[in-house]
Amino acid sequence: MKIYYRILAIMAAAAFAVACDPNKTPEFNDEDAFASFDKASFAFNETAGTISIPVTVASINPLKTSVTYEVDTENSTAVVGEDFSFADNTGVLAFSGSERTKTIDIKLEDKSGIYTGDKSIVIKLKSAVGVNVGAENSCRISILDLDHPLADILGDYTVTCTDYYNGAVSYTMTLSKDPDDITIVWCNALAPVCLTATEADGPMDCWGKVSEDHSTITFEIGQKPGADFGYGSLVLCEWYLQGGGLYVNSSGDSIVLTKTADGTFTTDFDIAFVDDQYVWKGGLLFGKKWNAANGTDYVITWTKK
């Protein structure tokens, strides 16, 4: 439907041009009509049941036509008959001339309670009678598995900590699953990098290894998530205080978050992001080691929302 509105906008613009210049009289017909998916991708939980994927014929007037489609098996990980089935097995959408949009209806097999991993269905439009096949002729449907082994850890957390430059800090971060490794989580904000620097060019996700009993998450320092403030890629580091000076360790060690209760992790490691030239450009979180001199225990705490 968005494509249809785009066509109407083009027609309106052309009509305005005609009004300004009567010598230009563009003609519009349905020779340029085309069929396409409304969106290039969708995501549904494995318990969604029957889902509907819209296909629209963009034309001046509703047309009578038929559109054929098929599963792109080379790029799909879900298997028809095992993970999903079509409500109509003909592979054809018949437009009667009274509607612009019809749907491909797909029944997802409910495999809740069994971990199979996320799967995807890729559907392609093969052909259309009397109209073209549009540019958006492929649609990827993601089937999200709700039984990930790390489901108790994944999700949004409130982070509370003390930052050397900003004092008490509280912000939200997210732990996400790895698409290939069920022992890995990705954290999008190990430190509040953008509290003092306004923008980072690139992602800030770092990966952590979850222990078998889910009691610890270990992040190797030295990771370069991809962000750059202009002095080179940011590096995940551990900081420490020595002789009144600040020092950085960017290799050969890890930052460990330890589970203290259900949905709560803490660490007294000092976390920071610095660039390749070791210029501080992000959040600097000081834990117990930095505050040992004054007897104050400052820890970083993650509390699941």
Image (tube, rainbow, N blue to C red):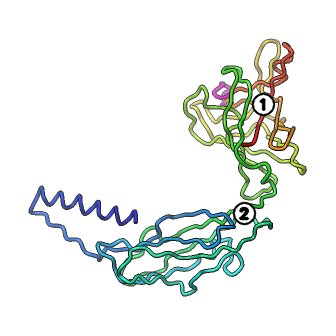
Crowding near the residue tagged with mark 1, few <14, some 14–19, many ≥20 C-alpha atoms within 10 Å: many
Q: Which mark is residue 176?
A: none
Check residue 137 for magenta coloring. Answer: no
Residue ranking furthest to the right: 213
Mark found first going from the N terminus, 1 or 2:
2
- State left or right for residue 96 relative to residue 61: right
Residue 300 image label? 1
Q: Residue at x 46, y 72 (%)?
A: 55
Considering depth in this image, is 159 or 121 the residue closer to the camera? Answer: 159
Give the secondary structure at mark 2: loop
Q: Residue 215: where, in percent of width, then height?
A: 88, 44
Query: At 80% across and 51% down in the image, what residue appears?
Result: 152
Residue 219 versus residue 104 in the image, above or below:
above
Q: Which residue is mark 2?
A: 145
* Residue type, label 2: Asp
Residue 139 placement, left or right of 289:
left
Judge left or right: residue 192 versus residue 130. right
**Is disc 1 placed on a helix, strand or loop?**
strand
- Magenta highlight range: 275-283
